[in-house]
Image: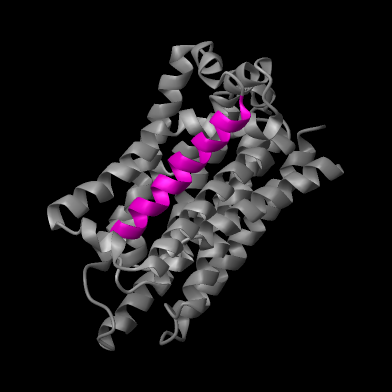
Amino acid sequence: MDLKEMFGVLVVAFAGLLNGSGAWPMKKMSKFQFEHWWFIGMLTGLILIPWCVTLTLCPNAFEAYASVPTTVLIKSNLWAAGWGVANVLCGLCFVRIGVALTGAILTGLGVSLGVTLPMIVKGSGLFKDAADIDSQAGFTILLGVGIMIVGVLLAAAAGFGRDRILQKQQQKSGSFVGGLIMTVIAGILSCGISFSFVYAQGPIVEAMKAKGAGEVAANFSVWAIALLGGSSINVAYPMWLMTTKKSWGVLLNSKVEFLLSLIIGANIAAGIVLMGNGMLLLGALGASVGFGIQQASQMLGSQCLGFLSGEWKSVAGRPRTQMYAAIGTLILAAIIMAYSNTLAKH
């Protein structure tokens, strides 16, 4: 693995840590409910930041977009819409079953599809030359996916044990099973954000560069247009909640919590853009390897946030041991996937 690819591994790993722990400001809020911080965070991270960068640094951006095949934009936004649903469910599950367990399940299920499909149906641009799924690199990646699934099962078992303990201590209420089902659905749809980039970045980046945009700005432009389907869902849902609850005024009740919500948005934008750049640095197989490492790292970030925020404070014994084992298993899977990128050259 050369220096460029090693840097790519670090970039996608950092992107995952940022995305996994990026919701930490919600732990500091008392006045804002889910719909308030989610609205500000998603509006900032998914719409305002990508579009501001694109319109500022990409000359003739709309002319460039107009030259991209319509089918590319439609497909990318359909993927993004699936991810948008997953992202809303993820936010609800953060509140319902906790950050740690939500992150673990999303990681394992999302990576199963997100890693394998780009080796079967090739992506755009650099990713169209990815190794086949029946190659040595492909089999190694599948081994990593299998190990990740083991990590998910361990995390789910830990979550059930944690829920039983907390209910006995009367520290938790609500349906854990309902939250778990929501998380599973979110996990399956969560890979849409990767596919939106993988299958759209080639023609969009090419069009932007033809109009004078630089590498970083061109990548921002992919997220700006390709995630519209998902970002619209993520902004519309909390708007609907605030309207039905007549709670729009809460947004003006705390400058500190408004600022914390903006930080969530900045974390989202940074994590998404770094993930895309890291995938490209990893080369043709970056769509699979990069997403796999990013997801494992995202799980680690969510586990750290969960532990540091006290989600597991009163839990000991087997559930905690199982969660530690899940973390170790997912780290092993990420290492195997990183190694598979080296095999792709042979």
Q: Is residue 26 left or right of residue 181?
A: right
Q: Is residue 78 left or right of residue 224?
A: left
Q: State which region is magenta.
A: 36-58
Which residue is pictured at 54% across the width and 66% down the height?
A: 326
Residue 209 painted magenta: no
Q: Is residue 70 above or below residue 106?
A: above
Coloring applied to the structure: one colour
Number of marks in picture: 0
Front residue of 300/15: it is 15
x, y percent for residue 225: 47, 28
Residue 42 painted magenta: yes
x, y percent for residue 126: 68, 25
Considering every residue shown, the one lying at the far right of the view is 2
Whether residue 82 is visible to the viewer of this picture, yes or no, is: no
Q: Which quarter of the picture shows residue 78?
A: top left
Which residue is pictured at 60% across the width and 63% down the height?
A: 329
Most common secondary structure along the magenta stretch: helix
x, y percent for residue 120: 56, 26
Q: Quadrant of the C terminus?
A: top right
Which residue is pictured at 51% across the width and 42% down the height?
A: 49
Which residue is pictured at 72% across the width and 48% down the height?
A: 9
Q: Is residue 310 above or below residue 327?
A: below
Q: Is residue 303 above or below residue 289?
A: below
Whether residue 6 is visible to the viewer of this picture, yes or no, is: yes
x, y percent for residue 324: 55, 73
Q: Quadrant of the N terminus?
A: top right
